Image (spheres, grey):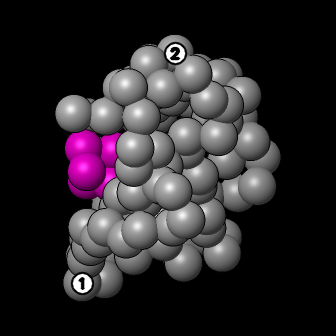
Amino acid sequence: MENAINHGLQDVKWEKRITLSTREQGESIVITVTDNGKGMTPEEIEGVLVGQPVAVELDGQQHRGTGLKNVIERLRIYYGIKDVFEIASEGAGRGTAVSIIIPRHGSHVM
């Protein structure tokens, strides 16, 4: 949610919308945050998924964001699986959907 607000919807001139949804997918639970903001390029998505710090501008200053990298790594370690995170975007001005995929059953699920 924080990334959708601070990055995806920052400086957007149209009506802003964030949606949180959950669903079952096989033996997993999928939690998805979708916004109708700036969108992401395929290169930006790939950079996040491989752990590259993301260059972001907040309050007129450049920052190197590592928050999503930390979340992805912690989920991978905790659940012992690689595919815990998906990002989808149709490009500039088309919004972004970020999904966390966690096992429904198992020793780590409380």
Is 105 placed left or right of 55 in the picture?
left
Whether residue 105 is situated above or below residue 42 in the rendered picture: above
Can you say whether 90 is above or below 30 in the image? below
Q: Is residue 65 visible?
A: no
Please name the amino acid that badge 1 sits on: Glu
Tell me the amino acid under the disc marked 2.
Ile
Q: Position of residue 41 (x, y in %)?
A: 70, 57
Q: Nearer the viewer, mark 1 or mark 2?
A: 2
Q: Nearer the viewer, residue 99 or 109?
A: 109
Per the image, label 2 sits on a secondary structure element best described as: helix
Side (left or right) of 72 relative to 58: right
Is residue 110 or residue 38 the one in the foreground? 110
Reply yes or no: does residue 2 show up in magenta: yes
Residue 23 image point, x, y percent: 37, 71
The quadrant the C terminus occupies is top left
- Disc 1 to disc 2, C-alpha distance: 38 Å
- Residue at 36% x, 26% y: name it: 108
Provide the residue span drawn in magenta.
Answer: 1-5
Residue 110 shown left or right of residue 41 in the figure: left
- Judge by depth and name the residue closer to the eye, 48 or 37: 48
Q: Identify the main secondary structure in magenta.
A: helix
Mark 2, Cα crowd under 10 Å, few <14 / some 14-19 / many 20+, is few
Q: Does the magenta run of residues contain 99? A: no
Is residue 21 visible in the rendered image? The answer is yes
Which residue is labeled 1 in the image? Answer: 15
Residue 3 screen position, x and y as percent: 34, 45
Residue appearing at x 65%, y 40% in the figure: 83
Residue 77's disc is: 2
Q: Secondary structure at mark 1?
A: loop
Where residue 91 sits: x, y (%)? Answer: 66, 70
Is residue 5 depicted above or below 66 in this figure?
Answer: below
